[in-house]
Image (cartoon, rainbow, N blue to C red):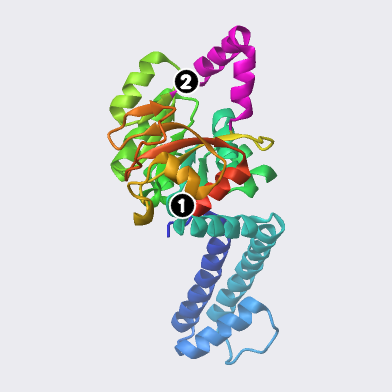
Amino acid sequence: MLLNYKYFAKVYYALFVVIGIIVTGTLGFMIVEGWSLLDSFYMTLQTVSTVGFNEIKPLSPEGKIFTSFLIILSFGTFGYVVTAITSYVVSGEYKKYFQEYKTLKTAENMENHTIVCGYGRVGKQAAHDLKFYKKSFVVVERDQEITNDPEFNEITFIKGDSTDDQALLKANISNATSLITALPNDADNLFVVLSARELNPKLKIISRASSYSSMRKLRIAGADNVIMPDTVGGAHMASLVVTPDMMEFMDLIKVSGKSTVNLEEVSFQDLPEAYQNLTIGELENFSKSGCNVIGYRTEEGEYIINPPNDMKITKNSKMFVLGNPEQIKKLNTVLGIS
C-alpha cells in the first residue's frame, strides 16, 4: 500500500519536538546533577508538565539554572504542540487522510477496472459514461481545486500526477484492463502512454490528442486508440447538417442516463461450452431477449454488418446488439455475463 503521510507532518513534528525536550532534560539532569536515569526522567516529566511537585532531590545552582531553561523551553513547546494538533483537527486534515486511505484501499482491491487520467472536460465525460455503464474505474487527477470539489468525492480517485509511475501504481494499474488518458497536453499523454505500456503490457490504452502529428506518436508509443475531441465534435456537427435525423437517432442509442435504446457489445471471450458453435439465430431463439444483432466481430478481427442467422458463434468473438436496457440485461443474464 502506497500512502501519503503528508497530512500527519505537523503532528509528527510536534511529537518529535516533545520527545526531544524529554531526552534533553533527562540527559541534562544526569550530567548536571549526576542523578540516575529514572530520577532524571521523572524530574524532566515533572518539570515539562508543570504539575508543581517538589524536586525529588535538592538542586545545585547549576541544576536550578538548567531547570529554569527547561521550564521556559517547555512553555513554547507545549504551546506549539497544542496549536499543531488543534489546527490538524479543526482544518479537517485528518478527514483528508482517511479519505485518501479509503480510496487507496478501494483501488488496491479493484480488478479489471479502467484508469482515467485527468478530470477535465473529456475525462469527466468519460467517467460519467463509465459510471452509467456500471464499470469500475478510478480517476487520477493532480489539480487540487478539482479534487477538493464535493462532486469529485463521489468517485474513486487518486490525487497525483498521471505522468508519475507512483500515481499509476496507486491506481492498481497491474490489475486494470484499460486506461484513458485525457490530459490537455499531448506531451503528458505521450508520457502516460509510455509509462502505462511498460507497467502493464496487456493494457488497452485510449489517448486524447490535440493534433494529427501527435496521433502518430501516441500510437507508436503504445496507444491502441487515439481520439481528437475537437475533430470528433466538428464532424458530428457537420453530420447534423447533412443527415440530421440519422445523427439524432445515433445520439439516442449512445450511452446516456436518459437513453431508452442502447447499442452494446457482447463479448464471447469466456463463452460457456453450452453456447459454443451455436448460430446467431439459435442464440436469439434461445435467449428470447428481443435484442437485434446488427454486427459481429470474428476471432480474426473481421467485422460483419448484419450477420446472417446461420453464422456460428466462436470463442473470442464479439456481437453487437441493439435493444433497450431490459432486453440487453436479459441477454447478458442468459449468457452469464455480469
Q: Position of residue 102 (x, y in %)?
A: 56, 59
Q: Quadrant of the N terminus?
A: bottom left
Q: Nearer the viewer, residue 279 or 52?
A: 279
Q: Residue at x 48, y 43 (%)?
A: 284
**Label ID, residue 228:** 2
- The kind of residue on which mark 2 rests is Met
Magenta segment includes 125: no
Q: Quadrant of residue 14?
A: bottom right
Q: Residue furthest bottom?
A: 57
Q: Secondary structure at mark 2?
A: loop
* Chain-order first, disc 1 or disc 2: 2
Q: Nearer the viewer, residue 63 or 305?
A: 305
Q: Secondary structure at mark 1?
A: helix
**Residue 333 appears anywhere in the view:** yes
Q: Which residues are magenta?
A: 227-254
Q: Residue at x 42, y 40 (%)?
A: 280
Depicted 76 relative to depicted 130: above or below: below
**Label ID, residue 232:** none
Q: Across the whole image, how many numbered discs are drawn on residues?
A: 2
Q: Position of residue 99 (x, y in %)?
A: 60, 56
In the picture of the structure, the residue carrying the numbered disc 1 is: 335
Q: 271 left or right of 288?
A: left
Q: Residues within 10 Å of mark 1 (few under 14, many from 20)?
A: some
Q: Residue furthest top?
A: 242
Q: 3 left or right of 254?
A: left
Q: Quadrant of residue 209?
A: top left
Q: Residue at x 52, y 84 (%)?
A: 41
